[in-house]
Amino acid sequence: MTIILSEILEGKKSVALGGHVRPDGDCVGSSMGLYMYLTENYSELEVDLYLESIPKAFSIIQRTEEVKHEIPEGKQYDLFICLDCGDEQRLGFSAPLFKNAAHTLCIDHHVSNNSFAEINYIKPEASSTSELVFGLLDKEKISKSCAEALYMGIAHDTGVFQYSCTAPETMEAAAELLRKGIDGSEIIDKTYYEKTYVQNQILGRALLESMLILDKKAIVSVVSKKEMEFFEAVSSDLEGIVSQLRLTKGVEVAMFLHEIDTQKYKVSLRSKGAVDVSKVAQYFGGGGHARAAGLTMKGSEHDVINNLAAQITLQMSGKKPEEA
Ligand code: 5GP
Ligand code: MN
């Protein structure tokens, strides 16, 4: 099923856009892309975008200073559009606006998405939400700044056009966006590869302290609250660590634990293909994609690692969780 954006917008006077907590490249790219498209082409429409604070590197995207980080009290929008968000809780602070909205639409590519909106445009086979947004827009009406945002989103969720989710359609979308005259190389360099000194230090620390487990088929690393304080790092500084761990020769799965509170960990999982990490994440209440998923877990570091390792082992041995 596809949807027609102009039909959904018919009769609507106000639209709010929202993405997931700790917004990443695809979340910011897809929501900023759609925000610019709507404000540029539907001048009658009131459009607001709600996101948590955006990593500094993404401010090369135009108009990110217009993003709202707090919700107005009692506000009701005619339509709320969720982007890159697998479930309602993942909306974080903007969830009340979603609940209050007269109509809701979700545009997403997470296999774990539970179709929580009124209209659900979910395509797990798509590389990114940004690619899905691109597909919904009138190509003639995409501006250069909108193209920059969408290109960033696609580049991020494909690991710069490298992950297996990169389809011919993905490259076609990227090509169309490049034709808008954007500097694709600069966007990738400044938002994906460039690291601050602190980011590199903490990456180095995480690699140095990593451990091979499960007969060297998995790798795990942990960054504690104390270390974060020592490096004066924020959670977005940890972006990319788990991808680097995944590159380790011989491992099938990489696990990265970030202690967000005492006995509480934000877990990132990455797979080379043999293990579906979205199933592991969903088993513990999280979600994501087959090769990239995340969740939050409570307990000691060792319990968290052991519990994750047990689910990974089950999949590697071909058993279903019920048979455990
Ligand atoms: P990351 O490890 O980069 O935070 O996330 C990897 C993928 O899993 C992303 O697509 C992200 O949206 C999803 N994800 C991360 N954490 C959670 C979570 O707690 N719940 C759900 N449903 N998805 C998550
Ligand atoms: Mn995404």
Image (tube, rainbow, N blue to C red):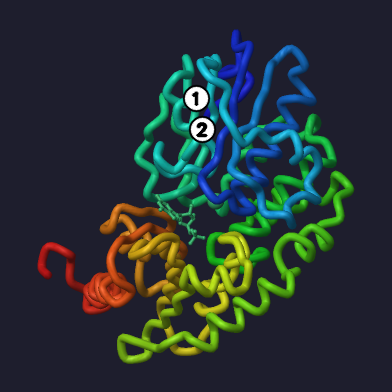
Question: What residue does disc 1 label?
Answer: 97
Q: Residues within 10 Å of mark 1 (few under 14, many from 20)?
A: many
Picture quadrant where residue 118 is located: top left
Query: Quick one: label 2, few (<14), some, or many (20+) residues within 10 Å?
Result: many
Q: Amino acid at mark 1?
A: Leu
Pointer 1 and pointer 2: residues touching (CB < 8 Å)? Answer: yes
Residue 216: x %, y % from top left: 37, 90
Q: Nearer the viewer, residue 147 or 236?
A: 236
x 44%, y 76%: residue:
222
Relative to 135, does residue 219 appear above or below in the rendering?
below
Q: For residue 293, say whether it is visible.
A: no
Give the total of numbered labels.
2
Residue 267 visible somewhere in the drawing:
yes
Q: Which residue is rendered at x = 22% and y = 78% of the image?
A: 317
- Left or right: 148, with 158 as reference point: right
Residue 322 sits in quarter: bottom left
- The image position of residue 249, as x and y in percent, is 50, 89
In the picture, the disc for residue 284 is none
From the viewer's side, name the closer residue of 299 and 21: 299
Give the SS element for disc 1.
Answer: helix
Quadrant in which the C terminus is drawn? bottom left
Which residue: 59% across, 43% down?
Answer: 52
Q: Position of residue 312 (x, y in %)?
A: 29, 73
Q: Which residue is mark 2?
A: 94
Beta carbon of the mark 2 residue lies under 8 A of ligand 1: no
Amino acid type, callout 2: Ser
Judged left or right of residue 288, residue 156 is right
Left or right, 72 with respect to 180, comes to left
Q: Looking at the image, which residue is at 60% across and 77% down?
A: 203
Dot 2 falls on a residue whose secondary structure is: helix
| Residue 79 location, quadrant | top right
